[in-house]
Image (cartoon, rainbow, N blue to C red):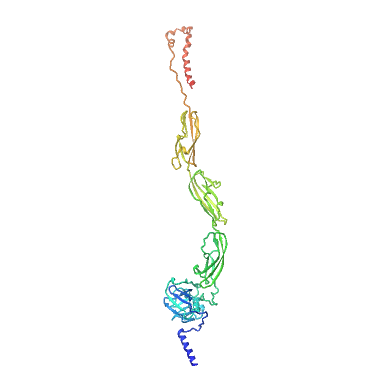
Amino acid sequence: MRKTVSKLIALLIVVVITAGIIPMNLCGIQAAESTNYTIKVNLGTNTTTIYNKDGKAIKAMICSPSSESPTGTFYVPVKYRWHEMIGNCYAQYCTRITTGILFHSVWYYKNGDKSTMSVAAYNVMGQKASHGCVRLLCKDAKWIYDHCAVGTKITMFWGTKKDDPLKRPSFMPIRNGKFTDWDPTDPDVHNPYKKAKPTVKAISKTIEYGTKIKSLADLVTVSDSLGNELEKTDVSVKTKGKVNTMKLGTYKVTYSLKDAAGRKGKKTVKFKVVDTKSPVISGAKNKSNVAMGNTLDVKTGVTAKAASGKNLTSKIKITAKKAGKNVPIIAGKIKFEKKGKYKITYKVQGKNKKTAKKTVTYQVTDQRVKMTLKSSSVQIAEGSAFDAYSYITTFTSYKGITLNKKKNIVVTGTVNTKKPGVYTITYKAQQGKKTYTAVTKKLKVTVKAPAPQTTTPPTTKPEQTTKPEATTPEQTTQPEATTPDQTAQPETTTPPQEETTSAEEPTANV
């Protein structure tokens, strides 16, 4: 009997020496332990990885070791449910690595009181923060405590991300302003965070038609069970449903997610694809050199469509003004009768009552050809030659380029040079087939008969030999003037009659 008691006392001493001071609330191991696991701690990346007996990485944990953490290979010698730490604080789920070094949870101010965890210590998880131990989230410290038996192999080394076969998990910081709190990952049924779930919130429940969506996850914000908004890379999000932004309508998408604490959330969001934008008018452009007199179809090349892609071209309404006055538009065509600025306005309204409006300017210039004549009227002699083109002195485009007269000027009207009279010649000039360059001028042509030719008779004087006899002294005898012998007097009147006849001969010649 005494030998038995002695053996029990000796065994107890060995246990105490090996394990150190055992807390009063030490609990037994609840999960099935196994030495088939291997634990590796990468001090360079603050990552702890669990390997199975086949050497396959099965679990990664975020951790907070320190630059004082030892390196090498160790074997678990003992585990503690709660254990006092340096600085009058406590930790739970402690698994010893080597002397003075443990895997353990974030520390607590009170032994056994899970609501007294240091929030500040928790929020630096993933950084160098311990005095050499390897701090873990409560759920991870518990996993090692539950599954890795005494004797489990541990390797601690300084490595890089390439040495981590699994991505290091993120964790959920506590931002509620509390000094102490529960570890959100503690699986204890009394944990107030136990019922918290990650949430999904639509950024906007309306999506503009045609919006490009890379991922349905981009349509929502995701928060973990602590209310921390997460990056999509920090949370697992699965979606069910689709949104066709090229078709107006309502779509349902179900989001399922799991946060770093392992808590799950699910929500169905309705999205509505809408068209709230104004239509777009295309093709309406300013024109700086429109020819006066030209007629243009101002609809040509101008289109309109809604943001949804619906063609609204046929609904475009067009107005035009010059100097504030309306310009007539017939079937979309405008005749620019005067030079100057024309304001042309296009307006269209979509089904959503949104309106688009665009105004352009047409600068109209006089592009008629320039043609000058020698004179507006000419006289030509009967029987002379007449060339209508010879009376054109200059003929150029509006830019001053000399043009071919006979190819670009049409002459109408005729001149009969054999018949005296007044004739009208019309010149219609234009550059090629450009009717808006046309100008018209008229030339009055008078064909004049030659002046009548006057014939002058020979200058033969009548004999005046008898005339002196009438004035001779011998005629002083009065009686002789009255004698019958003076019957030859009529002969003295013949010469005047011959002169009269001579004066009428030119008329007969005509």
The answer to whether any part of residue 232 appears in the image is yes
Q: Quadrant of residue 394?
A: top left
The answer to whether 95 is drawn above or below residue 465 in the figure is: below
Question: In this view, which residue lies farthest toward the bottom?
Answer: 2
- Residue 18 screen position, x and y as percent: 45, 84
Q: Residue furthest front?
A: 54
Q: Say if 8 sits above or below 446 in the image.
A: below
Location of residue 352 in the rendering, given as x and y in whole percent from the top left corner: 57, 57
Q: Nearer the viewer, residue 74 or 293?
A: 74
Q: Position of residue 96 (x, y in %)?
A: 46, 80
Q: Residue at x 46, y 37 (%)?
A: 406
Q: Residue 223: x and y, percent? A: 52, 69
Q: Nearer the viewer, residue 495 or 273?
A: 273
149 shown above or below 272:
below
Q: Is residue 244 above or below residue 426?
A: below
Q: Nearer the viewer, residue 387 or 364?
A: 387
Picture mark count: 0
Is residue 60 visible from the viewing direction of this image?
A: no
